[in-house]
Amino acid sequence: MVFSSFMFLFVFLPVVLCVYQFVPDRYRNHVLLVSSLVFYAWGGPRYLLLIAGEALVSWGTALLIEQADAKATKRLWLIVDLVVLLGLLAYFKYWGFLVGSIHALLHSNADVIAPVLPIGISFYTFQLISYVVDVYRGTVHAQHTYWKLLLYCSLFHQCIAGPIVRYETVADEIDNRHATPGDIYAGVRRFCVGLAKKVVLANACASLADTLVPAGAGTLAAQPLFGWWLGMLAYTLQIYLDFSAYSDMAIGLGRMVGFHYLENFDHPYLCSSVQDFWRRWHISLGTFFRDYVYIPLGGSRCSTAQYVRNMTVVWLLTGLWHGASWNYILWGAYYLAFLLLEHFVLAGRVPKPAGHALTLVVVVLGWVLFRFENFAEMGMAFAGMFGIGATGITSLAVRTAFLQNVFLLIVSVVACTNVGSWLRHQLAVRARTSDVALHVYNAEELLIPVVLLLVSTVALAGASYNPFIYFQF
């Protein structure tokens, strides 16, 4: 079950929210726990034991760490937790990749049987690791009730697609929270915004990208120059709208029941440098690696060689986290190279407008590495984007695709900026002194969630339906 499905939108979520609202406060966490386990089991009941087992290990080791007096004993239990959790993550996510790479190196034709990847294992594993490490550091107290820790790591709002929620962010709200009518409205609105970003914009951009630059289908053919760039622009928009949409929906769902998750994206395509891009993109992942890998290794307060080593470790892990394939490792190395270039060569030397333009080019080219696992396809895409092997500048098919999707692209680009929130803020300011602006603001606040939900429902009913197709030149 995913957020953008009829089962979730019109059966699961309404039932959960109704039961949650009508039970006494002391049972509300139980409702969330049961519903989260049902949601998780929908994609594979056998893996309930995995998430419950990892939570049990982290619960026990955190208690032992808190109760221990000797630093060595605390460290021992921390290591036990890390070995178990990272070992399970490595087995399920990377074992097939590792064995396949060895077979490829040895030119072996043996079949590689990889274990089925449990849904959300990267997210809840990192959350539990951050919890135990924080208990070890003394920044949070250990949770003495097992099922509450299981609730923390399995909340259906964010256990599948993030953000990576720190225990310290929700520790108090697990036991003490209250969702006001304002919270519920803000949550519903945020969820509807995310849903529309996913099913109306991201899915339509994905359709355009799959048409122009299909990956892994064996159908990648020579394109004109404009076709390569148009396809990768669509993919660039799709991947942000898709990733950020799930964070929007998770934040909205949490807000409906009184949880306040931190922001996970901050309009990354408005960045002025590669470093700025990564401050804004998947913030919870970036801060996880910063606080639990980069800083413990020494951060930037060390020698140049150690700094390069620390950055290399972080970006190798960042690439691997996104997927068990060499192209993701290459993607991490690509960003490592540009971050080191900025740090040692370009720092303070590039004007902001030029930095913004150059960074967007770096990001779009980086998504080529992210999209194509097959290196032959990747090479063809890079060559085509630089005019090598491209069949001219444009073609009738590419021009038609562009004209059919021009309004989709415009709206998607605007959705990647802060224009919407800025306009809403300006209207709210004017509503304080103008009755007309107040009526417009109230109407907008009332209608936007309803309209977005209706449009999203229509888009879901039509699967790949693109409402912007009717607005073309």
Image: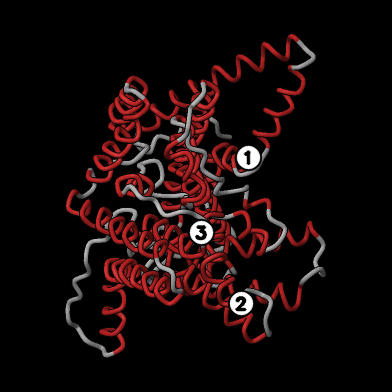
Q: In this view, does 412 lie above or below 28?
A: below
Q: In which quarter of the image is residue 358?
A: bottom right
Query: Marks 3/1: CA distance?
Result: 25 Å
Most extreme residue toward the front is 69
Is residue 389 in view? no
> In the image, residue 417 lies at what x, y percent?
65, 43
| Amino acid type, residue under disc 1 in the picture | Val
Q: Tag 2 or tag 3, which sits nearer the N-term? A: 3
> In the image, residue 146 lies at what x, y percent?
30, 49
Q: Residue 285 carries which label?
A: 3
Residue drawn where x is 43% and y is 77% of the image? 72
At numbered mark 3, what does the secondary structure look like: helix, strand or loop? helix
The C terminus - image quarter: top right
At numbered mark 2, what does the secondary structure look like: helix, strand or loop? loop
The reply to whether the C-beta atoms of the residues labelled 2 and 1 are less than 8 Å apart is no
Residue drawn where x is 27% and y is 78% of the image? 100
Report the front residue among 79 and 210.
79
Identify the residue position indicated by label 2 in the image.
298
Q: Tag 1 or tag 3, which sits nearer the N-term? A: 3
Identify the residue position indicated by label 1 in the image.
414
In this rendering, which labeled residue sits more in front, label 2 or label 1?
A: 2
The N terminus - image quarter: top left
